[in-house]
Image (cartoon, grey):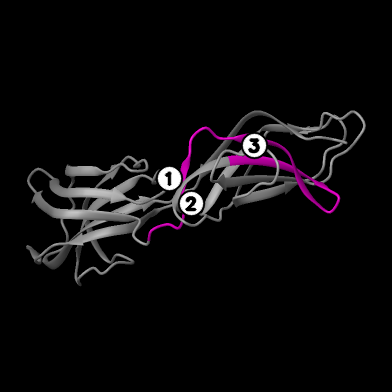
Amino acid sequence: MAALKIYGGSKFQFGTGSTTVTFGCGGINNPSKENATGTILVSLWALQSPYRGGTLSGKMLASYKLDGLNPGSYYSPVSRTVAATLPSPRQSYYLCLAVSEYRSGGFSVSDYRNFDETEVLGPVPTELFSMQGPWTWRSQPEGGIIDFTVGRISHNRPGTTGSLKLAVWATREPYRGGSLSGYELGSVVKKALQPGYTYNNLKQTAKYQRPPAGTYYMSLVLAEYDGSAYRTVAYLPASQTSTFK
């Protein structure tokens, strides 16, 4: 019978929020000179221990199918981005890329690759980001800049975050989350944070944009880039309003 083989390197990369995952390998070939394969299932698994063959016992995170291969044929490269289903509970897992072939009414593993490093996976915490004060701001209109500080920015993402935007906002009404309606006085963009990393005791300077005259509620707003735009993920309100002339 044909026996599918993986060649080249294997890889995986979770998207923002771990709702999707991109995974695959350098290629898959059918080394048989006579027999074609059945439909191919490429799957990514979360396991309690490295896979050593036999029945896969764990959580299938994602999968996709490819048409069967004729004798001596191959796919190269192999990679897809598909929806991911996270395991429960949240903990460290061994990940395995498996290539299976449809045989006699079901899929049977033909070849696999275990990844060296474990990955923390599980239900994503409700609060993905948090900011801890105190936070301060001070505009310098004559210099065209605004200075602001914040004690700590942390996150609970299982993977690396998108780039982060930190901005001071002035709004007519107290900001309670969601869409912002007001004036952004200044902002800076920070590099993405890796799992377990934080920003501490931030002191930033940005170009200042004065709002129209009036009294405003002030907020420090944190947004994450999701691949198309910056989305608000956390905020801190000021303790009192500010008046601009």
Q: On residue 18, which mark appears?
A: 2
Mark closer to the chain start, 1 or 2: 2
Amino acid type, callout 3: Arg
| Residue 68 locus on image (x, y percent) | 82, 42
Horizontal and vertical percent for residue 59? 58, 52
Residue closer to the observer: 228 or 16: 16
Q: Earlier in the sequence, mark 3 or mark 2?
A: 2
Mark 2: secondary structure: helix
In the displayed structure image, the side of residue 177 where residue 39 appears, left or right:
right
Image quarter in which the C terminus is found: bottom left
Q: Amino acid at mark 2?
A: Ser
**Magenta span covers which residues?**
96-125
Q: Residue furthest right?
A: 34
Circle 1: element type: loop
Q: Which quadrant of the rendered structure holds the N terminus?
A: top right
Counting residues from the start of the chain, the first of labels 1 and 3 encountered is 3
Q: Which residue is mark 1?
A: 159
Q: Residue at x 82, y 28 (%)?
A: 31
